[in-house]
Amino acid sequence: MDEALAAHPAGNWEDLVLYLGGSPGSFTGMLLTLAAKADPRNLALLRGAFPRQVTAWEAWVRHSPATWGELDAILAGESGGGPGSGVSGHDHQLGYLAPDPGGRQINGQLLGELAGACLDGCQPCQEALLSRLTGDAATTARLVELACIATSHVLGGIPASMTRQRAPGLASPEFRRLAAAGADGNNDAMFALCAQMTPAQRREAAETAAEILTGHLVAGGAPPGALP
Ligand SMILES: [Zn+2]
């Protein structure tokens, strides 16, 4: 975290959700809404499942106004260990992501770990796994493809907010470029475009794809064949 940001007072609730890697409507946002309403017993249950988010929430309430740097330090003390390939000792692997029907060189283990880390709400692992993913264009493209398949299954199509640059919505421009390229089943074009992107662009696309896919996994809107 850069120094100016570290010294900055932790802002409002939405800022805390963004700091934790979510958006107000995301799973992290819902989790903090739950934490805010929970009695001590339910809060303890939530803390067991999502230690990082609930610890951040409690620190934010207790120390307010803390700075982002102080929150960083509190969370570092809580979780121990920095990111490597995922955070050591964590096992988030999901075994049920379907293999790529196109027979491409997809790192299914990396995808399964990332999806699991998102579902578990483990931000350090998500960061580490997304960084690994940026060097792997085909696996990034597959993640975008899965996000589109899941959305199409739930909504019966891909909304403009995921493919058109000017439509309002949270999807990153890079995700929209890929989703637009792959529209109408033109998945090879999408994989080719992803291979031409810089790692930073792939990262932007992957973050949106991971968030969308996680939302569908949490909501249970799983497309047959791709997800359980
Ligand atoms: Zn983890």
Image: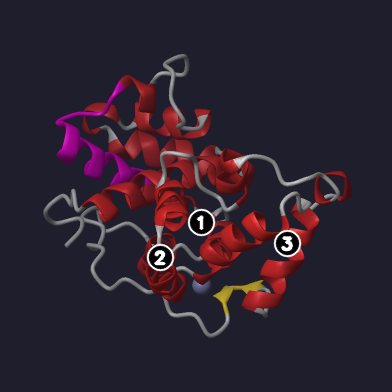
**Callout 1–callout 2 Cβ contact below 8 Å:** yes
Is 158 a magenta residue?
yes
Q: Which residue is mark 2?
A: 107
222 in the magenta segment: no
Q: Is residue 123 above or below residue 207?
A: below
- Mark 3 lies on a secondary structure that is helix
- Labelled pair 2, 3 in contact (Cβ < 8 Å): no
Q: Amino acid at mark 1?
A: Asp
Residue under circle 1? 136
Label 3 neighbourhood size at 10 Å, few (<14), some (14-19), many (20+)? some
Question: Is residue 27 in sight in this rendering?
Answer: yes
Q: Main secondary structure of the magenta part?
A: helix
Tell me which label, 1 or 2, sits earlier in the chain: 2
Q: Earlier in the sequence, mark 2 or mark 3?
A: 3
Q: Amino acid at mark 2?
A: Asn
Q: Which residues are magenta?
A: 144-159
Residue at 41% across / 53% down in the picture?
Answer: 37
Q: Nearer the viewer, residue 49 or 94?
A: 49
Compared across the picture, whether 94 is left or right of 15 comes to left
For this view, does 36 lie left or right of residue 77?
left
Answer with left or right where residue 204 lies relative to residue 95: right
- Please report the residue visible at 36 percent of the width from the left and 34 percent of the height from the top: 189
In 3D space, how far apart are the residues under numbered discs 2 and 3 (Cα atoms)? Answer: 31 Å
In the rendered image, residue 86, in percent from the top left (x then y), is placed at 55, 72
Residue behind mark 3: 72
Point out the residue furthest to the bottom here.
89
Residue 52 lies in quadrant: bottom right
| Of 51 and 82, the residue lying toward us | 51
